[in-house]
Amino acid sequence: MTVKEKIMFHAGFAAGAIAMGVVMFSIIAFAQNAEAAELQGWVGAETVTDGRDAVQIGITLEWEHVEFDVSHGVQKVHYRVPAEPEWKMDEWQSGTIATIRVYPFNWNTIRPFALWSHSSDITRGKPFNDENEPTSDFFGIGVSAYLGKRFEIEAAYGSLGRECQVIECYPGSRTNELRVAFRVYFWK
């Protein structure tokens, strides 16, 4: 990695962190005005088989049977999109993940859910560099379990798509994968 690439990586990561800070504070402001909404801060990691690894810091807004997560950190993507073989997708890079979970039942420790998760590197492309932004979407069903008051682990099985625009992904890029995530709550 050249000096210019290192500088652009750090500038991009900082810009992504600032953007996520703005989003997180907007969510906090919404949660303070919404009745019965819970706001939680966490540090966590996730992996999708044959997909991506991520280490993130995030915030969760839970409202009745719906959770919205937004997080920013680093991710390592293990695949290359056939249309864009020049992407350096096997390195740790800045990454943002947004997730929506729907819980049909609200049990205390174990909760089944359906989820949609979108991952991208919002710091790639102009003005930081000339590279394309890698994205992936995961749709699945799973279960989460609280291990004490501060720890949560979840597992989901579903469809992972690459180079996605909302719900439409690169043709032939969808595969069935397992997603495992672990979160430690520092604010609940």
Image (cartoon, rainbow, N blue to C red):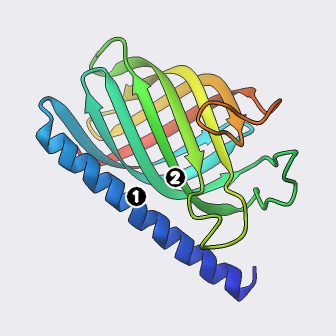
Residue at left 69%, top 87%?
A: 3
* Of pointers 1 and 2, the one earlier in the residue sequence: 1
For the residues labelled 1 and 2, say whether their Cβ atoms are less than 8 Å apart.
yes
Number of numbered discs: 2
Q: Is residue 31 above or below residue 73?
A: above
Q: Amino acid at mark 2?
A: Thr
Image coordinates for residue 110, horizontal then vertical, percent? 37, 19
Secondary structure at numbered mark 1: helix
Rendered residue at 42%/27% (across/down): 101
Q: Which residue is identified by label 2?
A: 96
User: Neighbour class for label 2 at 10 Å: few (<14), some, many (≥20)?
Assistant: many
Q: Which residue is mark 1?
A: 20
In-front residue for pair 108/24: 24
Q: Position of residue 160 (x, y in %)?
A: 68, 31
Q: Residues within 10 Å of mark 1 (few under 14, many from 20)?
A: many
- Which of the 4 quarters of the picture holds residue 93? bottom right
Q: Nearer the viewer, residue 18 or 104?
A: 18
**Hey, what amino acid is under mark 1?**
Met
Across and down, in percent, residue 80 comes to 82, 49
Image quadrant holding the N terminus, namely: bottom right
What residue do we see at 33% from left, 12% from top?
105
Residue 34 lies, with reference to residue 92, above or below; the image says above
Residue 36 falls in image quadrant = top left
Please indicate whether residue 39 sits to the left or right of residue 157 in the image.
left
